[in-house]
Each structure stands twice: as structure tokens, then as C-alpha cells.
Image (spheres, rainbow, N blue to C red):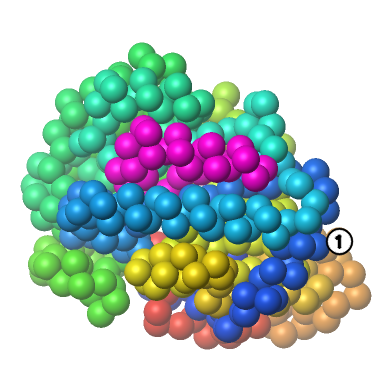
Amino acid sequence: MEGIIHRYAHLNVPRYTSYPTAADFGPVTANEHTAWLRHLEAQTSVSIYLHVPYCREICLYCGCNTKMAVRDDVVASYRRALEAEIALVGGLIENRVTIGRLHWGGGTPSILGVAGLHSVLETLRDRFSIEPDFEHAIELDPRHVTAELADGLAALGVTRASLGVQDINPLVQAAIGRLQPLDMVETAARRLRSAGIRNLSFDLMYGLPMQTIDSIRKTCASVTSISPDRISCFGYAHLPRLKANQRRIDEARLPSQDQRIDQANVIAEELARSGYRKIGIDHFAKPADALAQAAAAGRLHRNFQGYTDDDRQVLLGFGASSISTLPEGIVQNVTDVPTYVRTIAAGSLASARGFRLTPQDRQRARIIERLMCDFEVDLEQIGPGLDFTEELTILAPMQKEGLVTIDGRKLSVTAAGRSVVRVIAAAFDVFRRSPAAQFSTAV
């Protein structure tokens, strides 16, 4: 079985935080985007994503849409564009909607400063209603979490903070250009908790240069000693052709594909030993955490931020490269920051590309989401009467190899197949019957 898993783990497949994936987006006009916004029903509870594409320095491993902030006035100009976009979109939504969840991502969102974050929030409050108990999350760099920042975030109503830890081994940190000793992470967590932000998430990575099984075990032990509520663990995707900063990573120091698989397995073992429950393919949570409870109850979902207990059907993305999910389609803003700022300043939506969803697209999206979240799906329940002969034919060899069981139109991913569920989900992706090279490997 190990050989079978390794063979499928080498395949390049999407992470399926959406369907269709961003690789399949095509042109979407600002007029279409406007129409989709105007069709939103009154009092719809929505999620908001705010993208801040700036960091003080760029880590070598980073694959995000971000750039180094050299001048504060450039960051301030971007904040004003973000506020202008919020006002523009809010004005286009004819029926006022409510915000049930808010997430700041980046980049390093705190680069706006507490005053800048407050200014953006006030613009949101002017254009949208905010639910009293909404979740307010932000991604943070542990190297820049001061006591003043922690207190300021708490005053703004932040309820969850996600810290980019990646790895605590000094050799690995040097190899990826991100030096942050363990005590720096511990101090950041302590400051946030002291300020009243007690829901903490940590991000870890495997497949990084210089990582070993032993170093990963030590990282897991150090991280769990801080006791975050959630831990996300992602495989490093080395794409130097697309990311210039990754060209500075010594490829000779990267683990092999088989070593990556072993590293992912060790992380899962160590976190389970520390009491964390595995959620989907790459998240872990304490049993009392809302994410673990949602997974146990079959209420787990997946969107552009990964696994979530958020069941809202509308996600409004603001900022360069941000993606919105609307009932009629998916739309992504232009990724180039100067172009985004100029477009918004001209009073136009920054819509660049996306996808017009058909009923069949929505059905396939639900099938893929259930496989990624529950590791099982009833095709008849989601797509009654639809012909999935081709998909079941694709999955037949995986059934013989013990990765999935097929009972009529009910699919269940086996324990052995869960690590390569992305490959199984790809059978329902009409845009790729064979995995494409622009995606990361399955593990």
C-alpha cells in the first residue's frame, strides 16, 4: 500500500479550495461582477476577506501574492484603495447585507498599523451591517507582534489570530530566510492571549530545505507546548519559475517526494499524540475547537482560506488578487497592485477574471467539497439523475488499490486513501482528466 500511496502522491493536482479552480478562470467583466453583486438578497450573511499584499521582507519560500513594502506612503495608498473598493462594492449591493465573518490575509495585514486597520473597519461599518458575534481573524507575523499591536487588535474586536510559524529549527529558518526563535513565537502568543485574543492558529510547513524527521518532531513538540487551538500544515510548493524569491532556495537541500510524505505522516502522528484531531487533509484542531466540532458533525466546509466551519455561500474579497464567491459566479481582482490601485481610483471594479457558474458546476463543487471535508459523498443526493459513468471508471483502479470504496453511487475514501483525496476529487473535475503540472503535488 505504501508504494501505491507514494505513486499517487507524486501527481500534481489542485488543492480544491474552489471549483472550478483559479487555473480555470477566464475573463469576467466589471459589468457582470456588478450584476452579481446587485442580485444579492437583503440581510444575506456574508464573509469578508481583506487582502494586504505587503511584508517588510519577503521570505524565500513564500508563494503568496505579496511584495516588500519599502515606503509607508505606498502602503497608505493601498489602504485608501482598499477603502474605496469597499465603498464602491457596498454601493453596488442594492440590498444591504450583513458581515458574519471577517478575515485579514496577506502579506502581513498588520503592516497597515492599528490606525489603518481601524480606518478600513470603519469603512466596512459604513457600508455593511456587522453581526454582534462575528468572527474577526487576522494573519500575523510573530516577529512583529508587539504588546501595543496585540492590545490594539483586541480593541478592534479581533477574536482569532493566525501566526506563521513554519518551522522552529534555526537551520531551516536560515534556509528559508525567516529567522524567528521559538521564544519569539512564545512571546507573540503570550501577548495576544494577555490582550484577550485567546483563539490562536499556527501555520506549519513540511517539504522545506534542511527539514528532517527529527527536526519536524522537535518543531511539533515545541509548537504543541504553546497550545494553539488550531494548526494548519501545508506542503511547500517549490515553483521557482513562477516565484522569483524561491529561486534563492538551494534545491539540493529540498527533501525528496518520498521524504515529504514521511514528513507529513510524522506531523500527523505527533499532533495526534498531543491531542489534536486531524481535520481534512492539512488542518488539526483541539477537540473542543469549533473546527473539530464541525468536522465531527459533518458541517465542515472549504473555501479560499482552507477548511472552515463557515457555511456562508457568499464571500466578498477586497484587495489585489482577492477572490469573491457569489451565487452566480466567482470573480478575482487584478493581481498587480499598481493596476489595482489605479483601477479603483478611477471608480471601477478591479474585476479581472473568474467563472460563471452553471447548476452542474455547483453540483460538482459540492461533490468535491464533501470528498475533501467528509471523505465520502452520495452522488445521488447531490446530483440526482446525473451520469457519472466516466468518473466512476476513472476511480475504478483506485478502488482496486484500496483507496476508495464505491457502493452504487456512494463513495467513501478509505483511511489509506485520505492522504491522496485530492487525486480522488480530481476525477470529478471536468477541466482536467489528467493532473496538470502547474499544481502542487498531492502530498
Q: Is residue 115 within the magenta segment?
A: yes
Question: Mark 1 — residue?
Answer: 381
- The reply, left or right, for residue 349 in relation to residue 184 is right
Residue at the extreme front: 346
Relative to 214, residue 33 above or below: below
Q: Main secondary structure of the magenta part?
A: helix
Q: Position of residue 287 (x, y in %)?
A: 55, 27
Residue 357: in sight, yes or no?
Answer: yes
Q: Residue at x 81, y 73 (%)?
A: 359
Vertical placement of residue 120 versus 236, above or below: above
Magenta stretch: give its range.
101-128
Residue 138 percent location from the top left of the image = 43, 39
Q: Quadrant of residue 270?
A: top left
Disc count in the image? Answer: 1
Nearer to me, 420 or 283: 283
Residue 194 vs 178, above or below: the answer is: above
- How crowded is the residue under tag 1: few (<14 C-alpha within 10 Å), some, or many (20+)? few
Above or below for 160 versus 192: below
| For residue 417, side relative to residue 427 (left or right) | left
Quadrant containing the C terminus is bottom left
Which three-letter amino acid code belongs to the residue tagged 1?
A: Gln
- Which of the 4 image quadrants contains residue 429? bottom right
Q: Please, which residue is most extreme toward the top here? A: 194
Disc 1 is placed on an element classified as: helix
Q: Is residue 266 visible?
A: no
Give the percent coordinates (x, y) of residue 31. 68, 76
433 in the magenta segment: no
**Horizontal arrangement in the rendering, residue 105 relative to residue 309 (left or right):** left
Q: Quadrant of residue 330?
A: bottom right
Q: Position of residue 251 (x, y in %)?
A: 14, 70
Residue at (31% x, 60% y) in the render: 66
Residue positioned 20% across, 72% down in the render: 244
